[in-house]
Amino acid sequence: MNQNSNFNFGIGESNSGMNTYDSYYKHQPRNNNGLTMILITIILIIVFSVLWFSGFFTPRDRKAENDKLFNRVCNAARTYADNNNKNDKRITGKIVYLTVGQLSSANLLEATLINPLNNEKIPSTTYIKLEVLPSGEFQCYGFVKREEDRVKPVITLKGEATIYGRVGEKVIDPGATAIDDVDGDISERIQRSGNVNINTPGTYKINYVVSDISGNISKVVTRTYIIQ
């Protein structure tokens, strides 16, 4: 056996050019930065596309949104008034106030409305103003501020305060009118009480009273019938 033969145990390089122990463990991992950047770019493109088509980058047209809200609220208010204020439609110039809460309770509006101009919730007590046109239709003015109404309506008798009649003869009640400083002519809301017995001589009284939309009650006005 040749004592001068060389034996390679993986230290250094062999004459055959194969990787040795030392070169194997000094090998560096592959650089994946390029693939990572491609993936990040794809994700960013997807996110941007979603935001773009969702309108995220489109400036809000708050006036247009407010106009849509106005139309929606007014349509709901007119529908409510057509169903619940039929007597008012006969009175040209009649002012009708409704609240957001009323329309919401009637399922004509959602319970929560947001003002697009300031992103604040619109209170359910907010008033919507309507006016009766000569055609009998309601014109809507949208949301209005309405100060607390504390003034009582006033009743005025038509004709004389005292009416004389004969036993057995028919008597006619001329009626009365009622005017409110806020609600206007509310004569149709007058409540009448009392009776006249035309078959029995005596003095009879008919009372008139009215309340406005805010609940202010007028003074009671009385007409006297004297049957002789």
Image: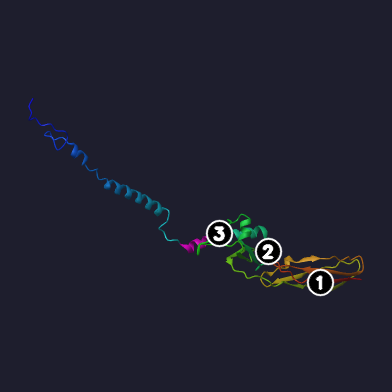
Q: Residue at x 67, y 59 (%)?
A: 84
Q: Which sits in the foreground, 153 or 157?
A: 153
Give the crowd class for mark 1: few <14, some 14-19, many >=20 residues within 10 Å.
some
Outermost residue on the top side: it is 1
Residue 137 in the figure: left or right of residue 207:
left
Label 1: element kind: strand
Q: Residue at x 19, y 37 (%)?
A: 21
- Image coordinates for residue 116, horizontal then vertical, percent: 50, 62
In which quadrant is the N terminus drawn? top left
Q: Earlier in the sequence, mark 1 or mark 2?
A: 2
**Tag 1 and tag 2, C-beta contact below 8 Å:** no
Residue ID for mark 1: 222
Mark 3 vs mark 1, foreground winner is 3
Q: Is residue 19 above or below residue 116?
A: above
- Image coordinates for residue 97, horizontal then vertical, percent: 64, 65
Type of amino acid at the residue the image marks with label 1: Thr
Extent of the magenta region: 61-71
Type of amino acid at the residue the image marks with label 2: Asp
**Tag 2 and tag 3, C-beta contact below 8 Å:** no
Query: Does the magenta-highlighted stretch encompass residue 64?
Result: yes
Prevailing secondary structure of the magenta residues = helix
Q: Which mark is residue 113?
A: 3
Q: Earlier in the sequence, mark 3 or mark 1?
A: 3
Q: Where, by quadrant of the figure, is residue 86 drawn?
A: bottom right
As measured in the structure, the alpha-carbon distance from the residue carrying label 2 to the one carrying label 3 is 27 Å
Q: Which sits in the foreground, 112 or 135?
A: 112
As measured in the structure, the alpha-carbon distance from the residue carrying label 3 to the one carrying label 1 is 46 Å
Residue ID for mark 2: 88
Q: Where, by quadrant of the figure, is residue 87 drawn?
A: bottom right
Give the crowd class for mark 2: few <14, some 14-19, many >=20 residues within 10 Å.
many
